[in-house]
Amino acid sequence: MLTPEQAILASMALPSVGALLISLAGRSPNLREAVTLLTSTLLLAVVLTLLPLVMAGARPSLVLFSLLPGLDIAFQVEPLGMLFALIASGLWIVNSLYSIGYMRGNKEANQTRFFVCFALSLAATMGIAFSGNLLTLFVFYEVLTLSTYPLVTHAGTEKARDGGRVYLGLLLGTSTVFLLPALVFIWYIAGTTDFTVGGILADKLKPGELALLLGLCVFGIGKAALMPFHRWLPAAMVAPTPVSALLHAVAVVKAGVFSVVKVVVYVFGVDTLATAGATNWLVVVAGFSIIAASGVALTADNLKRRLAYSTVSQLSYVTMAAALLAPLSLVGAVLHIAAHAVGKITLFFAAGAIYTAAHKTEVSQLDGIGRRMPWTMGAFAIAALSMIGLPPAVGFISKWYMLSGAMASQHWLAVSVIVLSTLLNAGYFLPIVYRAFFVAAPADPHGHPHGEAPLPMVIALTATAAATVLLFFFPDVPLALARQMINP
């Protein structure tokens, strides 16, 4: 059995070693993919060894080394990081299975590089999840950006390179221009960047200064895709669908909203921000992002573009709920990280399955496809219910907590945003389901009607759709971790 400290190190070392072994096994696709699946399974097993400790109230920690007084590369497993690590390590397994079917089914080039970069991105994600301070989070945040760049530009086309430039430019630009100065300033005034229950900035700044510093942090965390720094996300849709699933569900955007919640709770402190009224502006900005992105999704015919702007909207739910600072809304924010992960990865899996089996990319092309691909579109329908916030899908629970928190704090703007955006969610998801199952398919000009995508892809998307429903009925673990974060 690993000690907690060994488990923390193993969570980052396993994917790194896996990346090396995948590279060495590159000439044997079967061996390469076996290593990928084994590594992802071992990572989840290691992460699960930490769960009982955290649930029991322990907070395993490890300091690797110190750069300066108060600036350490250090790790600590707290409830929010525990949940993020569970999501990322669990979904890596199904994403790996899906990737095998997708990459082979579409005869993609550079498959070894793809799986290597995927493993490295998971190592960075574990570093973010278990970061013990803002400096450590910043380091692994940047590593995640760099390790996912080759995935975004995987196709090697001019369009892919253009998308990669936007991706890299916006994410590195926001973190170095906004987040890095904020980190240095926090260290200067607090003497530390450690994530601490109750925050580290109490009585350090005036209300206006707190709001400004929070703005630097939130906009500096570009992966949260808050407008106007969201364009990297739709630009990155040039990547293969398994990468889109990684970006939107497993690692990148989840690292963004995870970091926002962690900074709000453990750096600024909920009570400090509430007393200063320093988050009122953030509720407005996040609410605008929710509605504006939903409006773009409503008009997008390209399926991946519609899903990309849906992600911008759904991520801003988490930011807005955190900014409300109400206990119920904070629980909702944490739950929505999990709910969006399993729901959105299912939607992207379905989009990739449609492309692989039917070579269709536009919503207007999906008439009757549910009759030919019932497993894929059935999974899509379940995930769409979760994004809208309807039972029996876990998105209903997270939205219920967010709405309850907004009403409890009498923040009627937030209530209005949640209600209106739910209607918009229905407006851009339900027509897809209707087209798929209730509109007759056009005649196939070649007389070769397609069926489902390769079996590994169908198994993966069915598993994540099932998780979307199971978490509705059994939300105990994410709910307990969310409550522990608020009431340690």
Image (tube, rainbow, N blue to C red):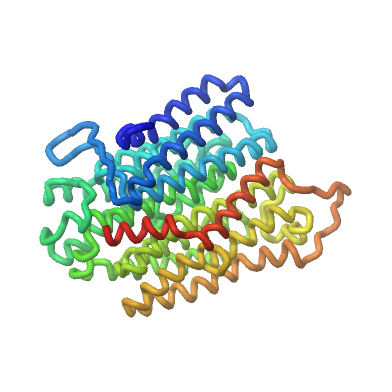
- Front-most of 21 and 183? 21
Q: Is 334 positioned to the left or the right of 488 in the image?
A: right
Whether residue 438 appears in this view of the structure is yes
The quarter in which the N terminus is drawn is: top left
The x and y percentages for residue 204 are: 11, 58
**For the point 56% across and 45% down, which residue is it?**
238
Residue 420 is left or right of residue 274, and the answer is: right
What is the quadrant of residue 28 in the picture?
Answer: top right
Q: Is residue 159 visible?
A: no
Report the label total.
0
Rendered location of residue 251, percent (x, y) = 45, 45
Q: Nearer the viewer, residue 111 or 173?
A: 111
Quadrant location, the C terminus: bottom left
- Where 327 sits versus 346, above or below? below
- Return the x and y of residue 135 as percentages of the image width and height: 24, 42
Q: Residue furthest right?
A: 447
Q: Residue at left 53%, top 55%?
A: 308
Nearer to us in this view, 188 or 203:
203
Which residue: 74% across, 58% down?
Answer: 370
Q: Position of residue 111 (x, y in %)?
A: 59, 30
In this picture, residue 108 sits left or right of residue 239: right
